Amino acid sequence: MKFNSGKIGLGMFLLCAGSFSSQGQTQLTLSDFQSPSKSWKEAAQVWADPQEATMLYSDGEGTVFYNLPDRKNPGKDLISSSEYGDVELKMEYLMAPGSNSGLYLQGQYEIQLLDSWTTTYPKAGDNGGIYQRWDESKPEAEKGYEGYAPRQNASKAPGLWQTLEVGFEAPRFSASGEKIKNAHIRYVRLNGVVVQEDVSLSGPTRGALQAKDIARGPLRIQGDHGPIAIRNLEVKAMDTPAPQINALTYEAYAGSFTELNQIEGKSPDITGEFETLADFSSGVRGNSLVKVEGTLQVEKSGIYRFDMASAQGLVRMDLADQSSGELSRNGINLEANLEKGSHPITFWVSKPRDWSTQGFRLQVSEANLWPVALSEPAGFAEWNTDPIWVDTQENPIIRSFMEMPDRGKISHGVSVSSQAGIHFSYDLSTGRLIRVWRGEFLDATPMWNNRGNGVSRPLGSQTYLDSRSKSDPIAGIADFQPKGYQVMGDGAVKFLAQAGANQISDVLMLLEDGTGIKRTITLGNSGSEVIAIAEGSQIKEIKQGLYLIEDTGLYLSLSDANMKPTVNSEGQVVLPINSTLTYTLLF
């Protein structure tokens, strides 16, 4: 097994980057950029042939904008008309085969966009990397420095739409213009996988618009290196000031309390006041219940979320005319629609055991405000565990439960890895190919930590082929019974099954070049069946024998020119089989 050096927080308050919120975002189109060159165009659809270098194809009128430079129309960078400071950004992009581009935050800090389809060990210049800084005065081997490679290669094949999500904090400056804080990458998620997190940028990366840090700047998309297409580019300014709490007073009651009515008729043992929650101390030895009152100052109207907890303690929160209810052992969260101005706020913290941590932890967030800690007492313990990643050298194949998006768990799952960095999961009980992915293999923390629940989770960028995973077998064959599997090599497994007198062989081989998976299904007795190979309602023929399953996001390659995929009434791409069927999925 492989122990990753990061931490997985099991406590309530380890708030890492969540899903991109759509509130308050602006969607940019080509018209939002300054004087685009003629190499930039708009269309309804853009696609590519993954085997045809640096070429894109388009069709129709729409808002997908793409760059297709040539000798007559050389590519130029796009620079937005608006300037930005702190932002959350999300966009979908499609790379031409072998192409190169980049997203510059503030025009200064480049996140690399590259066709890194089959890269096993990504570098700073690969897809999702933070590009190097550059110093021409240094020796040749040292000119590039402070680049940050993505944690893993979560890229998709060229011609497939990929998703990039970024949380960025601009550098900070004093009143005199001196930089007092570096630019900061909170996170970069590539196709749903965190590839960068908590990265401080000491200065602009190579090719920046300016050689120095700035407080605000435009978005910039590199256009002079190769073809790229972009859609659904959303930018949200993270400009809500964090609320402040002041005028704090407290009352402390000695004793062990689990309900507020237990202090009825009692006078506090001690009272006091303090400037900030960081100064909080009840002054009561042993068990206590403390009531803290103050004023919450809000600078911008909005819907605010407050999360509060006390280690081994109980908490309650009252804000304006809202309450979180009774004292809770599990922490609380409260959402309030607050106008700009002052609002009364009250916290209740019960310390029922002498060894409970004094004080409480409080975080606030809003659609345009990342979580901010308003109170974080010393000694607040979080229950963390080192994540357990499966080492493919030790365990190239793992049996485990598999969680499915649209149903419960699969209990007879098998996941298979390859040294090329692509992997798949298979349901033994039905003979269905469930998912494929690129990047690291499996997180087995849920399965192996503590008592475990038997579940493993893919670490890379997943593509589900059968998220519903119905209980019926692959081809609707009656009396389907799995008969185990045989390992044939790196990323190659033969699955065996029987249906009546029919012997079924299902050979899956992850391709050594890292482009995808080849599958050959053989029925012992000839007979006409239809095999569902992936979910999908839209199929585009790229060329003879090569199809794009658009809504699932993968390519289907067929060597039999007479065979055509179709879509059934259940939204599945299906292929006919008589005795043997061979196809390849590229992802």
Image: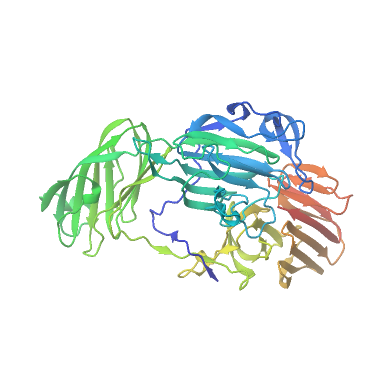
Q: Residue furthest right?
A: 562
Residue depicted at 26% across the width and 41% down the height: 245
Q: Position of residue 320 (x, y in %)?
A: 27, 36
Q: Position of residue 36 (x, y in %)?
A: 64, 28
- From what the image shows, is residue 300 above or below residue 226? above
- From what the image shows, is residue 375 above or below residue 413? above
Is residue 568 shown to the viewer in this render? no
Foreground pick, 300 / 524? 300
Q: Position of residue 333 (x, y in %)?
A: 36, 47
- From what the image shows, is residue 288 above or below residue 28? below
In-image side of 254 versus 568 (left or right): left
- Colour convention: rainbow
In-image side of 233 versus 176 (left or right): right
In-image side of 363 versus 29 (left or right): left
- From what the image shows, is residue 525 above or below residue 462? below
Foreground pick, 253 / 498? 253
Is residue 443 shown to the viewer in this render? yes
Q: Quadrant of residue 30?
A: top right
Quarter of the picture containing the N terminus is bottom right
Foreground pick, 307 / 248? 248
Q: Quadrant of residue 305?
A: top left
Q: Quadrant of residue 583?
A: bottom right
Foreground pick, 287 / 209? 209
Instruction: Count up the numbered dots.
Output: 0
Q: Position of residue 408 (x, y in %)?
A: 57, 57
